[in-house]
Image (cartoon, helix red, strand yellow):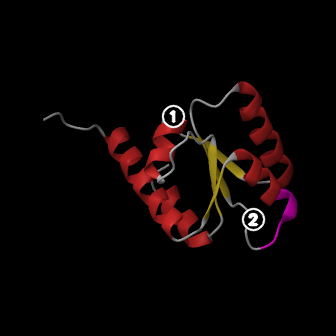
Amino acid sequence: MSELNGKEINEKKLLGALGLCARARKLIFGVPMICEAMRGGGKNYPLIILEAADTSDNTHKKIADKAAFYKVRTVRLNCDGATLASALGKTSSLGAVAITDTQMCRMIEQYI
């Protein structure tokens, strides 16, 4: 049985906390939905965007530009899109997710 280092433990806890956010329906899944939520505002406005490590340069630029314009914090994760999707109960790869609740956002920031 191999020991996990601190970075792997935090990633595992982060993915678990994201699963909790998904069950609480406080997540927005996918880049198009995140961009639409930023444009629309309202109660489902993203507070923080978590981007998978394997997104394309074009997708990364799109997220970074929109987030800078709308003043939303972005974090690039160490896991790929398939791992992110699997942790959230999705079958296909996810480029990014966004958290819409302040309490959930505080919980996630502990592991970033």
Residue at the farthest front position: 91
> Magenta residues?
38-42
Q: Main secondary structure of the magenta part?
A: helix
Residue at 55% x, 41% y: name it: 92
Residue 79 against residue 46 in the figure, above or below: above
Q: Secondary structure at mark 2?
A: loop
Residue at the farthest left position: 1
Residue at 57% x, 69% y: name it: 25
Q: Quadrant of residue 37?
A: bottom right
Residue 24 against residue 70 in the figure, above or below: below
Report if residue 75 lies within the magenta region: no
Across and down, in percent, residue 17 comes to 44, 59
Number of marks in picture: 2
Q: CA distance from mark 2 to mark 1?
A: 24 Å
Q: Quadrant of residue 42?
A: bottom right
Q: Quadrant of the N terminus?
A: top left
Across and down, in percent, residue 50 comes to 60, 47
| Left or right, 43 with reference to 108 | right
Amino acid found under the numbered disc labelled 1: Asp
Report if residue 40 lies within the magenta region: yes
What label does residue 56 carry, if any? none
Across and down, in percent, residue 58 comes to 77, 28
Give the residue number, with chain letter if any, for mark 2: 45
| Left or right, 39 with reference to 13 | right
Amino acid found under the numbered disc labelled 2: Tyr
Residue 19 against residue 63 in the figure, above or below: below
Q: Secondary structure at mark 1?
A: loop
Give the residue number, with chain letter if any, for mark 1: 80
| Left or right, 86 with reference to 6 | right
